[in-house]
Amino acid sequence: MNDKAGKLRIGSGAGWWGDRIDPARWNAERGALDFLCFETMAEATVSAAQVRKRRDPAFPGYDTWLDERMRAVLPHCMAQGTRIVSNQGWIHPLAAARRVAELCAEAGWKHARVAAVSATDLSARIASQGLAIMETGQPVSSVADTLISAEPYAGAEAIVQALDSGADIVITGRVADPSLFLAPMMHHFGWRADDWARLGQGSGIGHLLECGAQVTGGYFGDPGYKDVPDPWNLAFPYADVEADGTAQLGKVSGTGGCIDLRTVKEQMFYEVHDPARYITPDVVVDFTTARLEQAGPDRVRVGGIAGHPRTATLKVSMGCTEGHIGEDMFFFAGPGCLEKARLAETILRERLRMAGLQADDLRIDFIGVNAVHGAASASPACEPAEIAVRIAARCATRAQAEKIGREVDGMAVCGLASTGKRVPHQDRVREVIGLWSTLVPRSSVDCTVEFV
């Protein structure tokens, strides 16, 4: 491992729950990393996990790809002394940490020190604190009857505590994405929790790493305009961080993709509402002062990102039940397919009216014709070769949502000529979880560190 005066190499292991696993293994095997960080939680991940837990009490509550990811990287991390920070704990970090300890033992890393970082679950009391929903201004109490989760966004400090206590692997629940990468910097360089300049720079680097391949050409390529070499072979990035937070982004050799000023700039402003005030639990980041320099092939130097004192509040992501969506699809191909699709829509709307469908929203889209732009779509210049008809309705109850699939099934032999119908499946109805946000005082949230 590097000493306090030396550079620190931090690599990305995932940019979201469904991300590819091979690039994490390449980083662990060939990246010569000090830390490998996994970011697997989107805004909806906690709520989706809560829904699955409600449906399947045996669901352990952590990343469903935890075993595969850890088995891919643990042997290499053990051999090279690479430590791991991951938010794969989702709604049960302690269970995830225990599972990781078992996987470490399987890999021969029997003495690995694994820690779980858990934040206060605010679900039971968030509605009684007189708070407002950020998106609507309505009181949080207005959704009390439908609330199923209230997860605060924690920062880096508890992870730093775990690392300072000797953790080889830290598993967290809801932690802000950049904080996963900032924590190793704070631990390694000894940065104070109020060193806003360094925390701003470090959080900016964490933001660049958090989305995995988006810095190496993922979610970037546009043929003929922004070409990406060997896009089937994209690596995840790593950062060589210096004591002042300045860093060079790079990737392991022999991989596809690219790291240049364009890919870095696009990711720098990805999901950033105000570049001068990117709020994290640790620091308010200011990207407007950033300095980027192409330092070599697939190497970009990043410096100058500023930081300002953190806010007095923390964001809480709340999941609320909001009914069910029924969804299905069928197909037409060949001459006349657009006219058949239009008639099929009329048939379905009438049959759903006859069936007494009660829907808050109903959509029937022709994929390839109007599914993206809706009513603003231009009429096709020529007859499409094929059309997929997608129908979806949001309803208060599962029974109402099930009417969608039932009527689409009827189109197979009680519809139009040459209707193509997929085999009925169990996922045609899904529970809807609405996501809302509020702000709580920092004093409302505690984080605990537990070694397993």
Image: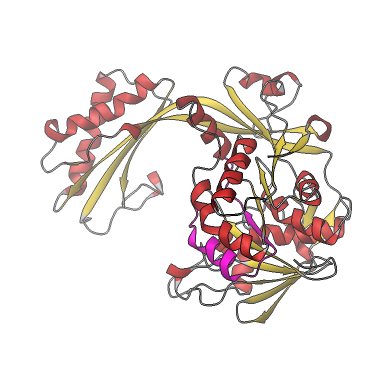
Instruction: Please give the name of the residue rendered at 65% of the width and 76% of the height, measured from the top-left corner.
Output: 299
Residue 158 rendering spot, x and y as whole percentages: 78, 44
* Camera sees residue 358: no
Quick one: 134 or 167, which is closer to the camera? 167
Give 416 or 231, whichever is nearer the viewer: 231
Residue at position x 25%, y 19% from top? 354
Q: Is residue 406 left or right of residue 71?
A: left
Q: Quadrant of the N terminus?
A: bottom right
Residue 288 visible in rendering:
yes
Viewer-side residue, 436 vs 182: 182
Q: Please check the rendered image and state whether residue 403 is part of the magenta-colored stretch, yes or no.
A: no
Quarter holding the C terminus? Answer: top right
Nearer to the camera, 97 or 410? 97
* Residue at the limit of the structure toward the bottom, as seen here: 296
The x, y position of residue 349, in whole percent, is 27, 29
Residue 130 at what x, y percent from top left? 76, 21
Q: Residue at x 58, y 71 (%)?
A: 30
Quadrant of residue 186 within the rendered picture: bottom right
User: Which picture quadrant has residue 301?
Assistant: bottom right
Q: What range of the chain is rendered magenta? A: 19-43
